[in-house]
Image (cartoon, helix red, strand yellow):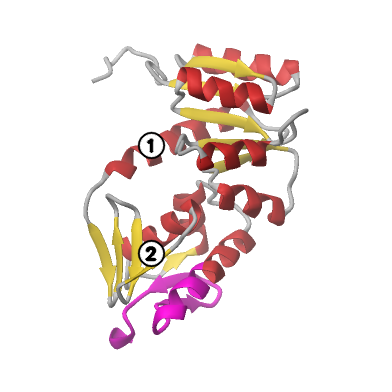
């Protein structure tokens, strides 16, 4: 257990990746001040090597890098079996870019220019969210089952392949099944973006519906102007 007077980041290893020296220095210095152990990298290949060597608990990753872009870095990490949480640092603000990054397996994104307090808050939030990934048990609704130990999702006994973001969204809906969750609540829990773009949420709801509804009756309802709820068909 962390002592009461220890820094918030005590014992936690972070990897910060950015090819702009000034940004890299400011981020690394600020995070070290908070007690995190910080490794720095300026290229995609250096980032991949640093993950193998230092086994960070979280990676802050710039999208625009001189060799491999951040999307390719995440793709290679996931293909190699690494589940290290990744937070993108990006100057790109389009919904398509955000969705692409999250769908590859990133956990969050921060748009440049950013405030250091925001970066620190996002890091803490993603690390807290990661602690819950070890929870055991099965979530279910009608013929839908999610094994939170193996991360397997099945509908009518057949496996459904979901991206990490789709999985988190589905689990939150299942935990709160029968309850209407607002756009803000879902954005805050799944992406830590209470004031984020509802279009991103709408896109992922569409992804889930397409995959789940192919195996049975629709489970996710839209409450127009409010949000979404997940319920068994026979409870409507």
Residue 74 location, quadrant: top right
Q: Which residue is mark 1?
A: 128
Q: Position of residue 215 (x, y in %)?
A: 41, 79
* 83 horizontally vs 18: left or right: left
Residue 15 location, quadrant: top right
Give whichever of 32, 204 is nearer the camera: 204
* 142 horizontally vs 217: left or right: left
Total count of labels? 2
Classify 10 Å Cα crowding around label 2: few (below 14), some (14-19), many (20 and above). Answer: many
Q: Is residue 202 visible?
A: yes
Q: Position of residue 168 (x, y in %)?
A: 42, 54
* The residue stretch that appears in magenta: 208-236
Give whichever of 210, 159 is nearer the camera: 159
Residue at (36, 59) in percent of width and height: 171
Classify 10 Å Cα crowding around label 1: few (below 14), some (14-19), many (20 and above). Answer: few
Q: Which residue is mark 2?
A: 173
Q: Is residue 179 above or below residue 50?
A: below
Q: Which of the image's four quarters has the C terminus? A: bottom left
């Amino acid at each position: 257990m962390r002592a009461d007077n220890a820094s918030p980041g005590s014992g936690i290893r972070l990897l910060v990746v950015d090819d702009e020296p000034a940004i890299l220095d400011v981020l690394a210095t600020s995070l070290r001040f908070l007690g995190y152990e910080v490794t720095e990298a300026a290229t995609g290949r250096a980032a991949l090597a640093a993950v193998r060597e230092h086994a960070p608990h979280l990676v802050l990753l710039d999208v625009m890098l001189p060799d491999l872009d951040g999307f390719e870095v995440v793709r290679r990490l996931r293909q190699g079996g690494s589940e290290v949480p990744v937070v993108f640092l990006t100057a790109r603000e389009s919904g398509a870019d955000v969705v692409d990054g999250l769908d590859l397996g990133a956990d969050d994104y921060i748009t440049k220019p950013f405030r250091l307090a925001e970066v620190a808050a996002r890091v803490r939030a993603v690390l807290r969210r990661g602690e819950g990934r070890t929870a055991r048990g099965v979530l279910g609704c009608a013929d839908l089952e999610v094994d939170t130990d193996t991360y397997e999702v099945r509908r009518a006994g057949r496996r459904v392949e979901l991206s990490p973001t789709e999985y988190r969204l589905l689990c939150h809906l299942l935990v709160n099944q029968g309850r209407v969750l607002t756009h803000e609540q879902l954005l805050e829990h799944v992406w830590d973006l209470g004031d984020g773009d509802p279009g991103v949420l709408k896109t992922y709801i569409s992804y889930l519906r397409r995959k789940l509804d192919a195996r049975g009756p629709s489970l996710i309802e839209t409450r127009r102007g409010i949000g979404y709820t997940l319920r068994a068909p026979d409870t409507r």
